[in-house]
Structure formats: structure tokens, C-alpha cells
Image (tube, helix red, strand yellow):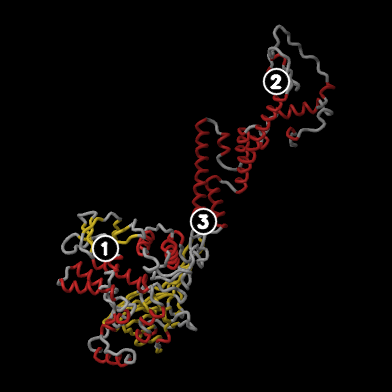
């Protein structure tokens, strides 16, 4: 290196450096605080006194913390929605209305299929409540059973046990007590006394190998026997072909006596058959299978649906249903009618008026909520021939889990693909599997509640129900004979007051309420809020933020990298340097190749016993540095005034 270039490098090295080329992070931070437009940072450097400097450091850090806190709140509240409610007055489409008799099948038709089950049910009731019965009668009933004995009580034994005596149960079939070491599942919180004692009634279910058993008890013997009867009833009816079950239930002409919609007469041809496993033949008015969807342009009971139903109470199954009447549900045309979940009961000998208010909801999907548009992104296959809903997803999930765990499907719901309903012959332990799976579903252990999501858009009808006695004492004298004459072709008996029920479904008004969600924030609003927080707490702008990123991240890391690189070079040079002469190190032998500067020369100690020479006269020709410093250093130039 030429002597001039070496002097230039030495001078440049000793000059105070500022900005991104600062040798240390401390010098970089000092330069930033003196040159930034952010308030507070400059006061940290120029303030006199340690207390004042500490206060400004505290104020600045507090302002920075508040900025981060407020910005975090803004980001967290970005995916919020604002709800707007709009009310429209317009002509409304009439919903689909599904009507079912509470009794699914005519008792006179299914009595032969259920004869053995009903006989064992009567014996269990007499045993439970101690009805008086002589020995000869009991012997005759026992002899009337088949050679295998009471199969239903043997398959699912009815038992009673005392709450005071744990581990012992009494079998209804034998009347003897025996040990029970299985799990006891309480289906109700309070126990009801039987025979004045603290006995609780239930039934036992076991797995195939009888290694796992559970005793399901109920608060009342009535509830236990009805549930026990229902299990066997589903098993029997699951083996009956669908066409035969449709013929055993009520036809549209038998159920519907009169029909009127919007002041125009209607009949059974306006209703579509819908067979429900637990409710038999149901009929849907204004279904999607019709060519056009009916609508109404006026509110009030006279412009809705009016029907008179023939319930035919004499054909009710005494053990399956304990009440009389019908069930009705209002739903969309493409929606499956879950009559057992949300149906409204209609009382006999009463006029039930149901006023409707339509509400249509629209929710935002991800990332604002977890709703789904059509269920295509939900990992549960829809086994219903209907549009997606939360109920459909939950029922489909349970049916799918039932097929996986038990090998068959629950009778009260539609069949999944390539599956059949549960029955004793093919699935002996389906009852135990069903109850265990149902308990896991209630405890949310199957994962259905976590997977299924609500639909983003749906319609909901708010129902207001009112009752009135019908027919009145005065009008029944002529009304019942007229209705009997109208139904003379379908029935062969005189109609009673308890056989009939009147139903009126109508819009109370034509005000449709729409609930819509919209994003409460936007990107533009979020950036504006960020700018407001920065300006409020530190008088900072976007350019200041860019400076902070450059200084605290890019320049700081650059300084650290330079220092590490310099250390690596020095280590590499020491490792590959040739070995020096043997002997003791003498600091006086270290020779500096660089020329000393004036400042470093002043720091050298004077040599002992030497006399400092006087100042020689100047040689003016040596002060000309044009050739050695032909180019002025960029960071040593004096700005023009």
C-alpha cells in the first residue's frame, strides 16, 4: 500500500463515525436518538442529569408499550362483525308443514307382531306394582309362552335394586336376588319409591361376551318399562319391509278430514308422504316436490293453512305412546323435518293456532366465524336427502359412528350407505352398543360436536301457539255428524270429540326480518388506527417505523456481523501465522507497521534520560499535500457555507 493511501486509511479509521457505519451499537443508538423525528428518544441523549434521563427513558418505554398494546387490541378486534337488522314487508313464501300422528301404526294391524312383547310387558307391570293375580292365572300365562320362555325379558332383563343395598339386584323374571358387579347408569337424578321402598327400576344390557354389563335405571318404573318396550319395538319393526309399514300406518285420507289454504280448498293430493321410523306416515304440505311453492300475500289465520285431523285414538298403542294428539313442524322445503326434536304437539278436542314470524340470518364464514356455506368442508357425509344443517350433521355423525362401532344403524334415523338397521338376529349386542354410544355422544366424547358446524345462512320461523276448545259444546251436536258423513268412505264409526284436532298455521304479519353480518373493520381502517396510535403516543409516522426497522434490525445486525467477521479473520490469521523466534516475549520488540498519529504520539511516555528536542523551523514545502491527498475524503469534507 502506498504511503499516502495508508495515511488516508489511518485518518479515516480514527475519525468519529456516525450513522449505519458506526463501529459499535452504542454509537449507532446515539446517532439515531440525535437524528430521529420520534419524540422522546432525543431527550434521552441530550438531557442533563441522570434522573431526568431515567425519566425520559421511562416515558419513552411506556409510550412504546402502549403502542404495542393498542395495536394488539386493534388486530385482535379486526375479525369482528357488525350486525344489521332489516325488516321487509313483502309477499312471503309459505313454509313446508309436516304433520304426523303421535301413534305411528294402527294398533289393530301391528298387534300380532307385538303380541309376545305386550304379554311380557303386562307381566312386568304386574310384578312391579303388585297387581293381584292368582297362581292359576300366572301359570296359564307361563304356559302360553313358547317353549323357549319369555325371550324379551331374558334378552334384556328388567331389574329392581335398593339404593341401600349395593351390589344386589332383583330379577323380575325369577323374583330372586343376585349379585351385580357391573356399571350402574342413572337415567334420572331422583329416585321414585316403588311399593313404599327405595327401589329403583331399570334393565341390564351386556356385550356379546357378557364381560361388560351395565344397569340402566330410571326414576320411575313407568319410564323404565316404556324405554324397555321401545327398544324391543324398534328391533321388531326394523325387520318389517318399508312398504308393509306404510300400509300399516295412516293414509292421507284417514288422517286429513278437511283442508283449506288461503281461502281455497285443498285435499290429500296437496300433501306428500314422508315415512318416519318412529312416527309412521307423515304428510308434508307445500313440499319441494310440488311444481310451485305456495305463497301468501296477507297475514292472519284466514290466509294460512287450516286442517282438521282424525287422530283415531282407538288405534293407539298403549305401551308405545302415553298421550294422544299429533305433531307438526314448520321447515324449509329442502330441509329434513326432525319431528322428534323440534315438533310442536297438537292436542285433541282443541283448536291449535300457530302464528309465524320469519327471520332470515346470514353469517360471515371464516375467518369471522366457524360456519359453513353448504357443509362441503365438514368431514361428515350427509346421509339425509336434504340441505345441510347442524342437526343433520350431528345425526349423520352419530349414525356413522353407530355403523362403525355397532355394525348397524339406529332404527329411528335414515340409513347410511351400505348399512342396515339393528336387529337381534344379526347384531345381538346392538342395544348395549347403542346405549354406550349414546352416553358418549351426550358427553361429547365422539367428536361430533367439535366437527359439526352451523350453517352460514338459514331461515327460522318463530312460532306463537294458542289453544281454544274445539268444537264447542253447542257446535259439536251438528259438527261431529257432518264430519262423520264426510269421512264415511274412510272410516266406519262415528267420530268422537277426542278423535279430532284442528290446526291453523299462518303468518301473523308479512314483516320479514333479515339479520346480516358485515365486517366491522377493513384494512384501510386498521392502518388508519395504527397511524393514530403512533402519532398519539410518539408523534411517529410510517417513515419513522421504517427507520426503526432499518436501525434496530438491519444496521444492528450488520455491526454484529462485522465484529464477528473481524474476530474470525484475526483468529484465522493467528492460526496460520509462522512461528516466531524462541525466547521470552519482549513488548519493546513489537513494531507497528502503521505510522503513528499525532494523538497517539502524545500518549507515548518520554524516554528516560533523553532530552526533548526543540521545535525545528518549519519546512513549508512539506505542508503541501496535494499529491498525497489528491482526493478529499467524503466524510471529512467541509460543507460550503
Q: Residue furthest top?
A: 609
The first of marks 2 and 3 along the sequence is: 3
Q: Position of residue 304 (x, y in %)?
A: 39, 83
The first of marks 3 and 1 along the sequence is: 3
193 relative to 211 in the view: left or right: left
Q: Nearer the viewer, residue 284 or 562?
A: 284
Which quadrant is home to the C terminus? top right
Q: Residue at x 36, y 74 (%)?
A: 237
* Secondary structure found at label 1: strand
* Secondary structure found at label 2: helix
Q: Residue furthest front?
A: 147
The first of marks 2 and 1 along the sequence is: 1
Task: Return the residue at label 1.
Answer: 202
Task: Return the residue at label 2.
Answer: 600
Residue 349 visible in this rendered orientation of the protein: no
Q: Residue at x 36, y 58 (%)?
A: 209
Q: CA distance from mark 3 to mark 1?
A: 54 Å
Label 2 Cα crowd, 10 Å radius (few <14 / some 14-19 / many 20+): few
Which quadrant is home to the N terminus? top right
Q: Position of residue 434 (x, y in %)?
A: 37, 63
Q: Is residue 599 above or below residue 92?
A: above
Q: Which mark is residue 78?
A: 3
Report the mark closest to the observer, 3 or 1: 1
78 relative to 206 in the view: left or right: right
Q: Nearer the viewer, residue 81 or 377?
A: 377
475 relative to 298 in the view: left or right: left
* Secondary structure found at label 3: loop
Report the mark closest to the observer, 2 or 3: 3
Amino acid at each position: 500500500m502506498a504511503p499516502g493511501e495508508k495515511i488516508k486509511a489511518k485518518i479515516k479509521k480514527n475519525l468519529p463515525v456516525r450513522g449505519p457505519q458506526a463501529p459499535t451499537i452504542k454509537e449507532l443508538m446515539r446517532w439515531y436518538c440525535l437524528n430521529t423525528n420520534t419524540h422522546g428518544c432525543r431527550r434521552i441523549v441530550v438531557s442533563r442529569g441522570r434522573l431526568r434521563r431515567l425519566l425520559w427513558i421511562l416515558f419513552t418505554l411506556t409510550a412504546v408499550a402502549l403502542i404495542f398494546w393498542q395495536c394488539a387490541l386493534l388486530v385482535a378486534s379486526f375479525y369482528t362483525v357488525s350486525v344489521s337488522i332489516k325488516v321487509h314487508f313483502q309477499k312471503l313464501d309459505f313454509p313446508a308443514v309436516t304433520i304426523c300422528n303421535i301413534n305411528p301404526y294402527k294398533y289393530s294391524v301391528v298387534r300380532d307382531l307385538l303380541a309376545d312383547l305386550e304379554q311380557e310387558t303386562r307381566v312386568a307391570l304386574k310384578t312391579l306394582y303388585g297387581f293381584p293375580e292368582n297362581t292359576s292365572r300366572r301359570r296359564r300365562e307361563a304356559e302360553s309362552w313358547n317353549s323357549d320362555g319369555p325371550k324379551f325379558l331374558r334378552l334384556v332383563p328388567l331389574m329392581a335394586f335398593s339404593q341401600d343395598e349395593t351390589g344386589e339386584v332383583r330379577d323380575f323374571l325369577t323374583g330372586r336376588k343376585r349379585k351385580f358387579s357391573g356399571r350402574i347408569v342413572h337415567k334420572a337424578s331422583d329416585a321414585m319409591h316403588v311399593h313404599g321402598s327405595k327401589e329403583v327400576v331399570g334393565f341390564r344390557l351386556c356385550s356379546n361376551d357378557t364381560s361388560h354389563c351395565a344397569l340402566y335405571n330410571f326414576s320411575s318404573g313407568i319410564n323404565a318399562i316404556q324405554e324397555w318396550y321401545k327398544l324391543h319395538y324398534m328391533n321388531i319393526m326394523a325387520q318389517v319391509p318399508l312398504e308393509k309399514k306404510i300400509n300399516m300406518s295412516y293414509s292421507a285420507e284417514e288422517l286429513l278430514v278437511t283442508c283449506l289454504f288461503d281461502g281455497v280448498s285443498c285435499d290429500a293430493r296437496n300433501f306428500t308422504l314422508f315415512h318416519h321410523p318412529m312416527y309412521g306416515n307423515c304428510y308434508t304440505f307445500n313440499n319441494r316436490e310440488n311444481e310451485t311453492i305456495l305463497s301468501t300475500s296477507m297475514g292472519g289465520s284466514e290466509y294460512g293453512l287450516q286442517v282438521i285431523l282424525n287422530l283415531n285414538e282407538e288405534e293407539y298403542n298403549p305401551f308405545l305412546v302415553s298421550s294422544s294428539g299429533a305433531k307438526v313442524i314448520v321447515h324449509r322445503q329442502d330441509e329434513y323435518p326432525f319431528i322428534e326434536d323440534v315438533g310442536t304437539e297438537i292436542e285433541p278436542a282443541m283448536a291449535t293456532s300457530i302464528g309465524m314470524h320469519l327471520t332470515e340470518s346470514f353469517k360471515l364464514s371464516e375467518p369471522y366465524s366457524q360456519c359453513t356455506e353448504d357443509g362441503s368442508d365438514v368431514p361428515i357425509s350427509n346421509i339425509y336427502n336434504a340441505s345441510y344443517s347442524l342437526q343433520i350433521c350431528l345425526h349423520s355423525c352419530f349414525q356413522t359412528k353407530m355403523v362403525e362401532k355397532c355394525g348397524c344403524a339406529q332404527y329411528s334415523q335414515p340409513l347410511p350407505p351400505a348399512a342396515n338397521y339393528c336387529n337381534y338376529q344379526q347384531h345381538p349386542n346392538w342395544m348395549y352398543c347403542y346405549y354406550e354410544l349414546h352416553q358418549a355422544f351426550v358427553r361429547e366424547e365422539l367428536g361430533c360436536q367439535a366437527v359439526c358446524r352451523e350453517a352460514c345462512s338459514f331461515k327460522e320461523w318463530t312460532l306463537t301457539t294458542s289453544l281454544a276448545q274445539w268444537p264447542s259444546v253447542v257446535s259439536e251436536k251438528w259438527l261431529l255428524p257432518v264430519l262423520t258423513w264426510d269421512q264415511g268412505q274412510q272410516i266406519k264409526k262415528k267420530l268422537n270429540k277426542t278423535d279430532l284436532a284442528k290446526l291453523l298455521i299462518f303468518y301473523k304479519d308479512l314483516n320479514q326480518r333479515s339479520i346480516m353480518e358485515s365486517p366491522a373493520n377493513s384494512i384501510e381502517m386498521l392502518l388508519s388506527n395504527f397511524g393514530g396510535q403512533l402519532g398519539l403516543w410518539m408523534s411517529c409516522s410510517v417513515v419513522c417505523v421504517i427507520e426503526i426497522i432499518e436501525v434496530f434490525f438491519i444496521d444492528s445486525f450488520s455491526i454484529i456481523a462485522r465484529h464477528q467477521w473481524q474476530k474470525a479473520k484475526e483468529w484465522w490469521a493467528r492460526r496460520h501465522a509462522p512461528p516466531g523466534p524462541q525466547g521470552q516475549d519482549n513488548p519493546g520488540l513489537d513494531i507497528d507497521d502503521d505510522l503513528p498519529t499525532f494523538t497517539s504520539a502524545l500518549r507515548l511516555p518520554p524516554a528516560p534520560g533523553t532530552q526533548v528536542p526543540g521545535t525545528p523551523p518549519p519546512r513549508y514545502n512539506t505542508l503541501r499535500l496535494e499529491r498525497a491527498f489528491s482526493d478529499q475524503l467524503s466524510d471529512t469534507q467541509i460543507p460550503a457555507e
